Amino acid sequence: MSLYRNLSSVAAVGVIDIGFSLASNILFPHTVPKAEFAAYRIFLLYSGYAGILHFGLLDGLYLRAVGHEANDVPAELVSRVRRGLWVLQCLASLAILPPLLRFGVPDASIGLPLVLVGTVVATNLLTFYTYLLQATSHFGLVARMVATPRVVGVVAAMALIVLGVATAMRLALCVLVPVVASAALLAGSSRSMPWRGDARGTQLGRVALLPVWRDGMALFLGNMGITVALTAGTLVASLVLERQIFAEYAFAAGLVSLMFIGFEWLGVAAAPFHARLVRTGSASTEWERLLLALMWLSPTVYWGGLLVVRLYLPSYESSLPLLAWLAGSLPFFGIVRTRAATVCRATGHQDAFLRLGAAGCVVVGAAVAAGGIFGRSATWIAASWALALGVLGSVGWLVVTRAYRLPAFRVDILLVASAVAAGGTFAVAHSLPSPAAGAAVYLALAVLGLMLGLRGLFLRRA
């Protein structure tokens, strides 16, 4: 199993996500009022919480299957988890639909909440098949089955935007329909997989639903805490800011989310790879080298966003200070979302990830809430989120790794030091009077920092 083969398969789908993000975050705000753009971003924000509504069942399935072959996974386990997921989605839909219909998505028609519920249910079904197939290293199959519907969705969305007829509702449908189609395709493919017919003697333990659920609960709660922490800024901004100002915050957050996708790629590709290394007692720094490079590269999204605003979206000029705060925090996002999640999954320390998620939910949530309540400005919210995420991704992660004696502690120290160096270098470079000079200075220092970091990985591997 090759990390780079896994990564290329994940990236095949991720490139489509980037295309959709570029269209919806750059072309869309150019053609519609800020209130309409804000309504669409709120739809994306709420649909991003879809993973909360499987309540850890899929995390348990992933932990049971990750690093194994398909013929090690009992068919009975797959069937029971699928039935349990359907029950949970029906109950969750009945619970969340009435308040969404009552309050709706601000500045949107009543149809958008209905599309939101459909997107949440379809996303969790897609996650079930994606987790199951990716855990057993069928990345290429997932890429093929997911890529085609998403391409159609991106083409449809871009056509709507170019023709000037895009609305929040129509773009939401461009999100929903590909998710439903991908889930259907993966469901058909999974039925032909060689799942183990006999549950006896399997390495994955019992196939009862409750033990699987119990296995995933710590990881689920950790993921939930981390998800709330990583989206707390946008969530608070949507609640306390006027729609026009929230649109500017959402624009900056949307540009930063392009780098989020890269960190997600690496985490998904590295998890089964790293789990097998841990199981066999082998050592490798492949995915950690890639993480280090991405951490240094990610803040450059600021200068890309600056060019977009100056040349194409001058009405969003006031979002640039927000973009600077958010971009500077990206290296710490990599620590929390990629390093922490991958190590805890691969080593079986879900309780460690739970502690980190709880700390993130409290620290980042409290900081952002304070910024929103007392500052009541987009800048205060962005700054408080960035600083709190920096604390979580440095002090918080090092405390957790030390307390649980997770492997490669020296590597974690090096990665955290690199995140601090990247964030500090960006803070100095972006404040230079000339943006071109700032970009040049940052890139030069980033290359130097990356070389030193790669050398440190080679010397300090535990």
Image (spheres, rainbow, N blue to C red):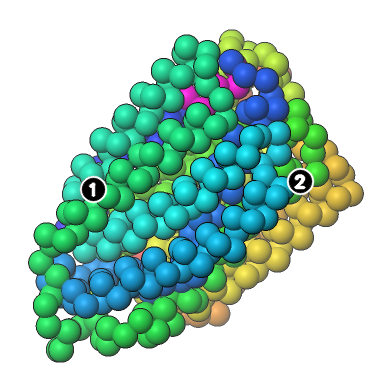
Which residue corresponds to the image point at 58% horizontal and 69% vertical from the top-left?
356
Q: Secondary structure at mark 2?
A: helix
Q: Is residue 240 visible from the viewing direction of this image?
A: yes
Q: Quadrant of residue 200?
A: bottom left
Residue 11: percent from the left, percent from the top? 31, 41
Q: What amino acid type is highlighted by mark number 1?
A: Leu
- Distance between the Cα atoms at labels 2 and 1? 37 Å
What residue sits 49% from the left and 76% below the top? Answer: 218
Does the magenta-highlighted stretch encompass residue 25?
A: yes
Q: Nearer the viewer, residue 432 or 452?
A: 432
The residue identified by callout 2 is 239
Q: Quadrant of residue 15?
A: top left
Residues packed near mark 2 inside 10 Å, few (<14), some (14 to 19) or many (20 plus): few
Label 1 SS: helix
The dominant secondary structure in magenta is helix
- Quadrant holding the C terminus: bottom left
Q: Position of residue 429 (x, y in %)?
A: 63, 30
Residue 68: image tag: none
Q: Residues within 10 Å of mark 1 (few under 14, many from 20)?
A: some
Q: Which residues are magenta?
A: 23-30
Is 352 placed left or right of 144 in the picture?
Answer: right
- Give the residue pinned by disc 1: 185
- Quadrant location of residue 206? bottom left
Q: Is residue 452 magenta?
A: no
Please state which amino acid type lies under the numbered disc 2.
Leu
Position in image of residue 318 (x %, y %): 74, 24
**Up/down of 249 relative to 404, above or below:** above
Q: For this rendering, which residue is in front, 94 or 251?
A: 94
Give percent across and percent down for residue 428. 67, 34
